[in-house]
Image: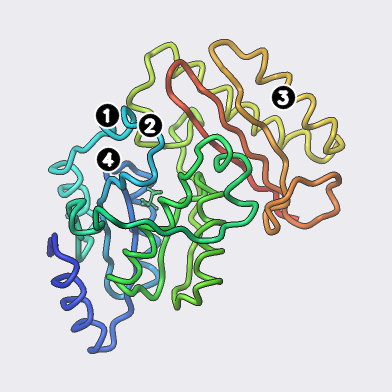
Amino acid sequence: MKIFNSKQAVHNYISELRSKGNTVGFVPTMGALHAGHLSLIEQAKKTADIIVCSIFVNPTQFNDKKDLENYPRPVDDDIKKLEKVNCDILFIPGVDEMYNSSEKWTIELGNLDKILEGKIRPGHYQGVTQIVKKLFDTIKPDFAFFGQKDYQQFMVISHMVKILRIKVKLVLCSIVREKDGLAMSSRNVYLSPVDRINSLALFHALSKFRDLYKIKSVAQLKAEITSFLNSAPGIELEYFEIFNAKSFQPVASKRSGSIIALVAAKVGTIRIIDNMIIEK
Ligand code: PAF
């Protein structure tokens, strides 16, 4: 695996490969790689000729300084994992390589920035779009792969790609879960043993949603699952919402296409998000 720290160097190297007719698949990450990330690489390998992964803990998408400082950075382990899955190129820049200190720009995200994660983490999606735009400009991928766990992030990036007319095909990859159902996340390592058990309430809530979906109305589903989560031990519910998976608006009835249930909660001190899509 070739490793680059400089934008120009990685750009030149990839341009050379592209000029020989190769397609480029890109997996942007913040490191602390787990099986979920590696499944994105596997998906990329099925789709493109050359696989590029980036590791960059993006400061502009953290609203909490402590969270940024504490974010895990096991770089050597990450490199080993990427080599094992035959990733071709790793781009791992420093902060100064990606940002000017005077830089201030935003992009119009409409309602996407104001609801659910956007509401709870003000500025988070502006930070995500800033870095993803810069990474796309550098790598110029044909395909970019994102995990469904951050579904709202996928909606935000899709919106950006559309309004800025960026030529990339975005691919949404299924959530990878631990054996007991917890969605994989780099932050799961911080759950205490008891919080780790309590965290399963989110997957149980989404499974309940899926099982009851055919026999209950949207209003009943919302009420029953919210109440289940509110009474789950060690869980501080932030939201449980039922949205149209395409328009990303709340739904009132099940008639409107694919449906996604989204949940966020604090388990101890750790925030966890998860979701489940029911295809029409
Ligand atoms: O999903 C993530 O890991 C990050 O938000 C991303 C897309 C790599 C941007 O920093």
Quadrant of res 130:
bottom left
- 232, above or below 75, in the image: above
Tell me where residue 153 appears, x and y as whole percent.
51, 51
Alpha carbon distance from label 4 to label 1? 12 Å
Circle 3 — which element? helix
Could you tell me which residue is drawn at 38 percent across and 31 percent down?
A: 64
Q: Quadrant of residue 202?
A: top right
Q: Which mark is residue 70?
A: 1
Judged from the image, the secondary structure of the residue bearing numbered disc 1 is helix
Tell me the amino acid under the disc marked 4: Ala
Query: What is the spatial separation of the Cα atoms under label 2 and label 1, in whole angstroms?
Result: 10 Å
Are circles 2 and 4 on residues that touch, CB within 8 Å? Answer: no
- Which SS class for mark 2? loop
* Residue hosting label 3: 226
Q: Pointer 1 and pointer 3: residues touching (CB < 8 Å)?
A: no
- The mark that comes first in sequence, 1 or 3, is 1
Which residue is drawn at the image coordinates 41% and 50% (left, top)?
127
User: Residue 88: horizontal and vertical position, in percent?
Assistant: 20, 66
Nearer the N terminus, badge 2 or badge 4? 4
Mark 2, mark 3: which one is toward the viewer? 2
Q: Residue at x 46, y 15 (%)?
A: 268
Which is nearer the N-term, disc 4 or disc 1?
4
213 relative position to 152: left or right: right
Q: Determine the CA span between mark 1 and mark 3.
A: 31 Å
Q: Real-space Cα distance between discs 4 and 3?
A: 31 Å
**Which disc, if any, is residue 64?**
2
Q: CA distance from mark 2 to mark 3?
A: 27 Å
User: What amino acid type is highlighted by mark number 2?
Assistant: Asp
